[in-house]
Image (spheres, rainbow, N blue to C red):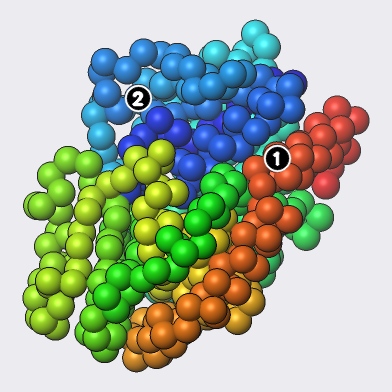
Amino acid sequence: MRIAMVSEHASPLAVLGGADAGGQNVHVAALSLALAERGHQVEVYTRRDDPDSPERVPLGAGVEVIHVPAGPAEQLPKDRLLPYMKAFGQWMGQQWSPEPPAVVHAHFWMSGVACLEARRAVEFPFAQTFHALGVVKRRHQGAADPSPPERLNIESNLASVADAVIATATDEVRELLELGAPAESLHVVPCGVDLFGPSMSQDHWWSGRHGGRILSLGRLVERKGVDTVIQALSRVPGAELVIAGGPADGFDDDPEVRRLRAEADRLGVADRVHLVGAVSRKDVPALIRSADVVVCTPWYEPFGIVPLEAMSCGRPVIAAAVGGLLDTVVDDVTGVHVPPRDPDRLAVALQQLLDDPPRRRRLGVAGALRVKAKYTWARVAEDTEQVYGRIMARVATGRVR
């Protein structure tokens, strides 16, 4: 079938690591390719942010990225894109009027806004994945949340009118029910991960470097809690911390980069903290395998792909006990849970793992097995396809939820 993925700010072609380029980009790209492998034709609609971008760019066999003209053709923070979603949706509606897709899957709340606008012109089955909820963001960031004030009401409306709402973690279901999503519309389909595979040389994996290497990988935004890792490092003598992520351009001038460097200076660990910038997807496996422990300690996390990538490489994960990380990381089986924003507890967990290579190896092996059993993109695509089939059948027969 012909499937439309709508990902208004998170292009699958983007370089990862910037403030608005992370897990959603990976999810949309990998899910689209996995669905194409199952025989479907997938079109990914994302906002044109470069005047030189062609309208259509192949992503892989059976998948095209379509750049939608909506707002200025330049990079803008996602929190400034809401005014352009009407034009985004109208453009899609015009394109789809002769022959709509079999199903449309919106990723993030603003993509949902565009899809509802497109639905004014043409009918189609509509699934919504939020990836992050404004109510959770507001709870943790308060006045620092830069989201448009309309976000909470819009998300509540989307949760109630979408033919299906696909949550990525069980923790999200409770939030969606409170937003007004009918229980029968809710489905849980996790994110997937590329099966990188563990290194062939166990001795090389676990040789360690001085006091051990710790890796933090992902977008550099305050809520990701990278400063907590730096604070914990000051209590773990001899270990080094590699921080991968950040904007591809203007890295040294980025406010979060400057803040993290200042924190490392303040704590006297600048010589053990290495901010290496954005990393290409092809280099991620080698980077993960260079580490003894991968740390992911956000304030909140709707899902979190980095822990799965680390587990796929056979590396133990220390993760904040929040959101989707409660599903993916099994405490003392594939990694260790710690409270968010607690450098003391994190330091203890780090030191214990760095001092215990056999335990690291045991957790890493269990993590790789768990990813292979539950989080392959092939399985995620199959489960997503089943949701599509249910809502297509319901729409075709005219039945409501």
Tags 2 and 1 in contact by the CB under 8 Å rule? Answer: no
Residue drawn 54% across the image and 79% down it: 358
Image-quadrant location for residue 117 = top right
Q: Camera-side residue: 354 or 306?
A: 354
Mark 1: few/some/many CA within 10 Å (<14, 14-19, 20+): many
Q: Camera-side residue: 168 or 159?
A: 168
Provide residue 106's location: percent of width, then percent of height: 57, 38
Q: Label 1 belongs to which residue?
A: 378
In this rendering, the label closer to the viewer, 2 or 1: 1
Quadrant position of the N terminus in the picture: top right
Q: Specify the label residue 48 is tagged with.
A: 2
Does any portion of residue 143 appear in the rendered image?
no
Horizontally, is 276 left or right of 134 in the view?
A: left
Question: Who comes first in sequence, dot 2 or dot 1?
Answer: 2
Mark 2: few/some/many CA within 10 Å (<14, 14-19, 20+): many
Give the answer, above or below, for where 362 lies relative to 105: below
Horizontally, is 281 left or right of 330 in the view?
A: left
Residue drawn 74% across the image and 22% down it: 39
Does any portion of residue 230 appear in the rendered image?
yes
Provide residue 204's location: percent of width, then percent of height: 43, 61
Give the answer, above or below, for where 67 lies relative to 304: above
Q: Camera-side residue: 167 or 292?
A: 292
Provide residue 264's location: percent of width, then percent of height: 15, 74
Provide residue 180's location: percent of width, then percent of height: 67, 61
Q: Amino acid at mark 2?
A: Arg
SS category of the residue bearing label 2: loop
Residue drawn 24% across the image and 86% down it: 237
Q: Specify the label residue 49 is tagged with.
A: none
SS category of the residue bearing label 1: helix
